Image (cartoon, rainbow, N blue to C red):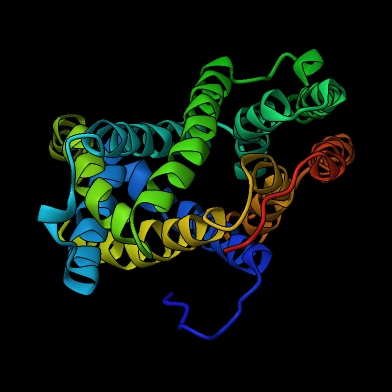
C-alpha cells in the first residue's frame, strides 16, 4: 500500500486499485453481513483497520491542532455511516446496482463543484442509468435497499471532499489512521447490538480482520493518496468505472448476473462519469 518516495505512481492507478479493493471487500463481507448485520460487520472491519493502521503508521497525536479536530471527526463519522449504509444496501440489492446508486453522490458533488454548469447533465444521465438498473416498472425494486444506497451516496460525496481535505493536512495516510478509530467508535453501539443479536461465531473475527486489509486499510489508504493529487471532480468522475467493478465482482464472487437492461444502465452511469472528467483538473504534487 505504501508508495515509496521517488516512485511516481499515477494517481489514476492508485484510484483504480483502491476501487477494486473496496468492491472485493464489500463482496467478501456478504457472509458476515448475513450473520451479524451491516453495522456489526462495519464495526469489526473498522476496528481491525484502525488497529492495523496505528501499528503501521503510528500517528503523532501532538501534531493535531484544534482546527484539525472537526474535520477528523466529520471524516470518521461519514466513513462509518457510508460503509454501514452501503453494506445494508448490498444486503438487499445487487452489488453493482448498489454501487451505481451510491455513485450518484460523488458524481453530483463533481458536477456542483465544476466551473461548468453543463457538467450537471452527467448526474442526470447517471440517474437515468440507475432507473434502468433498478427496473422499477417490474414492481420488484427494493425501496429500502435503494434508500440505503442513496444515503451511502450522500456520505460518499462528503467522504471524497473530506478525504482530500484531511489528506492535504496530514502526510501519507496519517489522516486515515486518525479517523478510522472515530469510524469504529461511531459504529460500535449499533455494531455490538447487531453482532450479539446475530449468529456470531469466532471465525468471523478472523474474516473481518482479513477483509479490513482490503478496506479500509488498502482501499481507503490508496484513495487518500490519489485524492491528494487530484481534484474533487477528477477523482469523483474517475470513479465512474466503480459501478462496473461492482457488477464484475458481484458476478464473479456473488453470482449476481445483470439483465441486458441493467447492463445498459451500468454503461450509462460509466459513460456519465467518464464524460464529466474533462471539466476539471488539479496539479499533481
Quarter the N terminus occupies: bottom left
46 relative to 18 in the view: left or right: left
Can you see residue 243? no
Q: Residue at x 68, y 55 (%)?
A: 245
Quarter the C terminus occupies: bottom right
218 relative to 262 in the view: left or right: left
Seen from the viewer's position, the closer of residues 159 and 132 is: 159
Can you see residue 121? yes
Above/below status of 55 relative to 32: below
Q: Position of residue 238 (x, y in %)?
A: 71, 50
Above/below status of 55 relative to 197: below
50 relative to 169 in the view: left or right: left
Above/below status of 71 relative to 96: above
143 relative to 28 in the view: left or right: right
Above/below status of 106 relative to 15: above
Q: Position of residue 62 (x, y in %)?
A: 10, 54
Seen from the viewer's position, the closer of residues 208 and 46 is: 46
Q: Position of residue 142 (x, y in %)?
A: 59, 20
Q: Position of residue 89 (x, y in %)?
A: 50, 31
Q: How many dots with numbers? A: 0
Amino acid at each position: 500500500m505504501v508508495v515509496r518516495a521517488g516512485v511516481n505512481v499515477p494517481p489514476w492507478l492508485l484510484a483504480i486499485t483502491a476501487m477494486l479493493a473496496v468492491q472485493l471487500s464489500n463482496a467478501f463481507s456478504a457472509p458476515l453481513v448475513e450473520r451479524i448485520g451491516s453495522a456489526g460487520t462495519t464495526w469489526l472491519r473498522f476496528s481491525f483497520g484502525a488497529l492495523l493502521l496505528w501499528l503501521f503508521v503510528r500517528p503523532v497525536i501532538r501534531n493535531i491542532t484544534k482546527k484539525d479536530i472537526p474535520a477528523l471527526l466529520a471524516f470518521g463519522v461519514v466513513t462509518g455511516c457510508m460503509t454501514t449504509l452501503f453494506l445494508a444496501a448490498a444486503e438487499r440489492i445487487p452489488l453493482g446496482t448498489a454501487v451505481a446508486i451510491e455513485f450518484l453522490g460523488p458524481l453530483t458533488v463533481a458536477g456542483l463543484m465544476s466551473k461548468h454548469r453543463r457538467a450537471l447533465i452527467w448526474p442526470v444521465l447517471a440517474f437515468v442509468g440507475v432507473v434502468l438498473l433498478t427496473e422499477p416498472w417490474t414492481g420488484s425494486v427494493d425501496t429500502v435497499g435503494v434508500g440505503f444506497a442513496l444515503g451511502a451516496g450522500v456520505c460518499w460525496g462528503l467522504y471524497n471532499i473530506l478525504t482530500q481535505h484531511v489528506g492535504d493536512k496530514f502526510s501519507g495516510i496519517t489522516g486515515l489512521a486518525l479517523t478510522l478509530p472515530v469510524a469504529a467508535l461511531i459504529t460500535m453501539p449499533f455494531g455490538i447490538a447487531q453482532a450479539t443479536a446475530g449468529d456470531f461465531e469466532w471465525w468471523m473475527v478472523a474474516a473481518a480482520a482479513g477483509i479490513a486489509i482490503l478496506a479500509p486499510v488498502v482501499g481507503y489508504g490508496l484513495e487518500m493518496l490519489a485524492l491528494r493529487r487530484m481534484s474533487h471532480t477528477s477523482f469523483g468522475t474517475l470513479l465512474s468505472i466503480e459501478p462496473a467493478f461492482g457488477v464484475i465482482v458481484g458476478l464473479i464472487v456473488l453470482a449476481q448476473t445483470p439483465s441486458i437492461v441493467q447492463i445498459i444502465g451500468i454503461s450509462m452511469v460509466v459513460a456519465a462519469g467518464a464524460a464529466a472528467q474533462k471539466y476539471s483538473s488539479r496539479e499533481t504534487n
